[in-house]
Structure formats: C-alpha cells, structure tokens
Image (tube, rainbow, N blue to C red):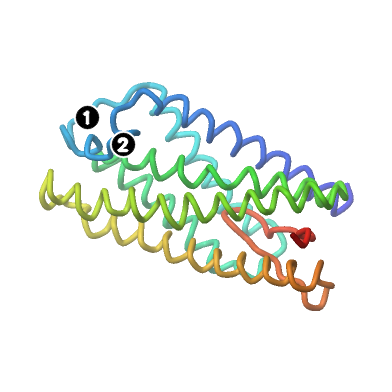
Amino acid sequence: MSGTSLLMVRAIWRFLFYLIAFWYGIAVLWNKQYFWDTRHCWYGYPWQPIPDEIYWYYMIELGFYWSLVLSLFMDVKRKDFVEMIIHHVATIGLMCFSWADGMVRIGTLVLVVHDAVDYWMEGAKLAKYLRYDKLCDVLFVIFASMWFITRIVIYPVRLISCTLNEGHHIVGWFPMYYGFNFLLLVLQALDINWFIVIVRMAHVFITQGQPNGKNGTQVSNNNQAMPTCQITKW
C-alpha cells in the first residue's frame, strides 16, 4: 500500500469514528438535563446513575484514545509529538479520573464538544488526498470555525466554568477538584496553541494562496497533521 493510500485509510477510519462518536454523543445526551443546564452535572454528585448508553460511549472513546497513543509510536514521528502525547495522556487521565470520581456527566460534555471538530478535519484531509481542492477549502473553513466555536468559546465558557465555579458552588470542595481542573486547563492551552497555528495557516492561504512545500504550515489536532489546502480568497 502506498503512503498516500495508507494516509487515506487512516483518515477514513478516523473520519468515520469521529462522525459516529459525535452524533451518537448528541443522540444519547439530547434528553439529559445536564446537556442543557450544566448545573445538573453536580446535582446528586457523586451518586449519579450511569445509563448503559453513556457507559458504552465512555468506554469506546477511552479505547479509541488509547489506540491514538499507540499509533503515535508506530507512525512516523510527528513534529508535535510531545504536544500530542500531552493531549492524549490528559484526555485519558480526565476520562479515568472522572469515571472513578463520579464526574461522568461533565466528562461526556467535554468529549462531545471536542468530537464536534475532528471529523471536519479528517474530511478536509480526504478531500485533499482526492485532489478536491475547492471542497478541501470549504471543509477547512468549517473546521476552523467549529474549532473556534467549540474549543475556544463553548469549552471554557460553559464547561471549564462549570467545573471551576458551578461544581465548587453546588458540591463544595471534592477530591479531584484541582487535578480535574488542571487537566481541563491543559487541554484548553493545547486548543489555544493549535488555534493560533490554524489562524496563521488561514492567513497564509488568504494572502498568498497555497503555500509551497518550503513555507507550508501544517496544523494538527488530536490525530494527524492537517493537509495544506488552498482557501479561496473571498
């Protein structure tokens, strides 16, 4: 299998996983009170029942992130290898600690907010591999917009605020308060760092068209470097 074919197979697998995981998460959380009002993440804590659909959502996501950690050591070493290790370890740590400490509700919200971005990026990569540059441009714009909305706005304003303020106000101090919030802030720092790279990449596309191999910038998120694709000058 050629290098491009292998990249396409990986992108297809990750595209399908993130697409299904995100919409499954939306489906199982839609009728949950805490999906609409994050204060309900803390009512009844830590003795909150975990429905079967939430159990499987958590376990499948946890297994997937472990596979991403293993793939980092099996693939060609990336320039952002350290950042990716930190991201995956922080994510796995959050899932394990939240499961052990009864914070599954806020954990599911963190998962669904982050999954909202990833399949757009994988779709853009597939479009690039198939040489559909215009489609790649459109998907990249959607990807960048979704990144800003979900990871730069919703994540800190609704979810980190929920754990820092609402959790402390409703529950008071709890064993994982500092550790859990520290890991959430680590993810936020990585999200901001990658968003800065996305903005720089978009600026290059808008002002110069598609960069060449020497000056091109690649953007990465939880999985794989973002392919360079030209954004139409609008």
Q: Secondary structure at mark 1?
A: loop
Q: Which mark is residue 192?
A: none
Q: Residue at x 31, y 37 (%)?
A: 104
Of the residues under marks 1 and 2, which one precedes in the sequence? 1
Residue 100: name its quadrant: top left
Q: Nearer the viewer, residue 26 or 71?
A: 26
Of the residues shown, which amino acid type is indicated by label 2?
A: Arg
Residue 144: name its quadrant: bottom right
Task: Give left or right: position of 134 versus 54.
Answer: right
Q: Which mark is residue 105?
A: 2
Q: Nearer the viewer, residue 130 or 209?
A: 209
Q: Are marks 1 and 2 in contact (CB under 8 Å)?
A: yes
Q: Residue at x 45, y 58 (%)?
A: 152
Q: Residue at x 65, y 63 (%)?
A: 219
Say few, some or many: other residues with alpha carbon within 10 Å of mark 2 (under 14 / 14 to 19 / 20 or more). many
Name the spot of residue 19 as percent of width and height, x first. Answer: 61, 35
Farthest residue to the bottom: give it. Answer: 214
Task: Give left or right: position of 95 versus 74.
Answer: left
Task: Give left or right: position of 183 versus 118.
Answer: left
Q: Residue at x 47, y 54 (%)?
A: 151
